[in-house]
Image (tube, rainbow, N blue to C red):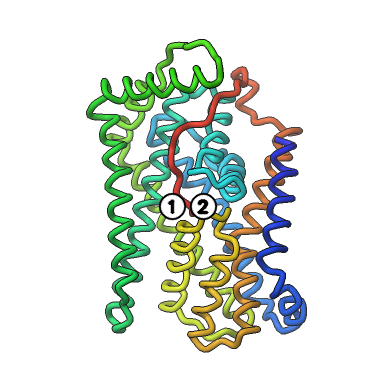
């Protein structure tokens, strides 16, 4: 965990310097013009978003039949978020954090993977709500372009594939077991490890089936996921208000949805550079000057990305010296990363 913390901090600092080299002087020059009230509100919302991510993963774990008490998921959620942003590899880095955390609690690995999938599905549904809202707003104002329709169709296809794959695990467990066995055998041959039987697929299927009956926790997970998107748009509003950029709620939703889509489409970790360019361009088109837009974007990225990543790095470092209380009840074990796709908050 110590090495991850160092990597996360160094990676975040390097990415920020490269992505914002042109605007750093503008930001420093404009610091005296930032309104303290919106700045404080943005910082508070950023911290609330970190806690909300913990609530999302707690609800997903409980839906999968894994007991998780209030606030216990804040640390792994923050570390997992930082891992996914720094190491952009389909969410595997973040999933590995939860698998490691589950090992300290003696949770079945397959059940932990199921919890990660449930959190991802909730985030996917919340993203669908955000995109549908954005398309509706653009349609009402006559600003809907063909690119948004293409993007919506692509998202729909992606969501269908992910949902169908999860349903396949529950309905066709035998097929999922064969696929998992083949994947495990191939991996073991590459790593020259002996083939060991496991129950990961059965645990995964059982946990996903249990989530169908734990609808209260599943609804909570969806609520936290939608709340995450709302908090993201609120951070953008606070950043714009802090520097005096003209931006209303409608514009904040549209620009935030665009930034989130750009981040997902980008192969660069955390969408660094792509998000800044798209968000800045849309703020300028909304009436902000180039300098004000650059300052607003920098503040937004501090709220939405750099504070959560730094928090995750610090918590990863702290976990080295302050072990999880659950580790006193179960011997820790290091398990491989789970093959799951994670969707950004």
Please give the residue where the numbered disc 2 appears in the rendered image. 52
Of residues 324 and 259, the one nearer the viewer is 259
Check whether the beta carbons of the residues at disc 1 and disc 2 lie within 8 A of each other: yes
Mark 1 → mark 2, Cα distance in angstroms: 6 Å
Please give the residue where the numbered disc 1 appears in the rendered image. 224
Left or right of 117: which side holds 337?
right
Q: Determine the secondary structure under disc 1.
A: helix
User: Where is residue 203 shown, x and y percent of the image?
Assistant: 38, 23
- Graded by Cα atoms within 10 Å as few (under 14), some (14 to 19) or many (20 or more), the crowding at tag 2 reads many
Of residues 123 and 259, the one nearer the viewer is 259
Residue 40's disc is: none
Question: In the rendered image of this protein, does residue 166 appear above or below residue 140?
Answer: above
Say whether disc 1 or disc 2 marks the residue closer to the N-terminus.
Answer: 2
Q: Determine the secondary structure under disc 2.
A: helix
User: Where is residue 219 shown, x and y percent of the image?
Assistant: 34, 47
Left or right of 116: which side holds 313?
right
The residue sitting at 62% across, 49% down in the picture is 86
User: Where is residue 239 shown, x and y percent of the image?
Assistant: 59, 74
Question: In the rendered image of this protein, does residue 187 appear above or below residue 237?
Answer: above
Question: In the rendered image of this protein, does residue 298 appear above or below residue 247?
Answer: above
Residue that lies at the very extreme toward the left in this rendered image: 171
The residue sitting at 48% across, 22% down in the picture is 187
Of residues 258 and 128, the one nearer the viewer is 258
- Graded by Cα atoms within 10 Å as few (under 14), some (14 to 19) or many (20 or more), the crowding at tag 1 reads many
Quarter placement of the N terminus:
top right
């Amino acid at each position: 965990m110590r090495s991850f913390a160092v990597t996360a901090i160094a990676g975040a600092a390097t990415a920020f310097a490269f992505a914002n080299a042109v605007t750093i002087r503008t930001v420093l020059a404009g610091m005296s013009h930032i309104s303290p009230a919106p700045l404080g509100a943005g910082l508070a919302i950023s911290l609330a978003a970190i806690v909300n991510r913990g609530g999302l993963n707690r609800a997903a774990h409980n839906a999968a039949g894994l007991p998780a008490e209030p606030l216990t998921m804040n640390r792994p959620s923050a570390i997992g978020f930082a891992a996914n942003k720094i190491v952009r590899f389909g969410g595997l880095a973040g999933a590995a954090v939860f698998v490691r955390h589950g090992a300290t609690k003696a949770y079945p690995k397959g059940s932990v993977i199921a919890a990660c999938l449930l959190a991802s599905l909730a985030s996917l549904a919340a993203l669908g709500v955000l995109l549908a809202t954005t398309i509706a707003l653009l349609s009402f104002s006559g600003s809907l372009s063909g690119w948004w329709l293409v993007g919506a169709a692509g998202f729909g296809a992606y969501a269908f594939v992910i949902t169908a794959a999860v349903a396949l695990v529950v309905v066709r467990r035998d097929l999922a077991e064969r696929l998992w066995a083949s994947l495990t055998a191939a991996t073991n041959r590459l790593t020259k490890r002996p083939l060991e039987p496991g129950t990961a697929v059965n645990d995964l299927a059982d946990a996903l089936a249990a989530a169908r009956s734990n609808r209260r926790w599943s609804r909570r997970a969806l609520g936290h996921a939608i709340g995450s998107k709302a908090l993201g748009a609120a951070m953008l509003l606070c950043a714009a208000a802090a520097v005096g950029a003209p931006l209303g709620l409608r514009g904040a939703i549209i620009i935030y949805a665009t930034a989130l889509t750009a981040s997902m489409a980008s192969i660069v970790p955390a969408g660094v550079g792509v998000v800044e360019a798209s968000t800045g361009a849309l703020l300028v088109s909304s009436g902000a000057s180039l300098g004000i837009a650059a300052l607003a974007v920098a503040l937004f990225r501090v709220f939405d990305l750099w504070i959560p990543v730094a928090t995750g790095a610090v918590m990863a470092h702290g976990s080295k010296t302050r072990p999880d209380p659950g580790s006193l009840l179960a011997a820790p074990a290091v398990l491989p990363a789970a093959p799951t796709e994670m969707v950004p908050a």
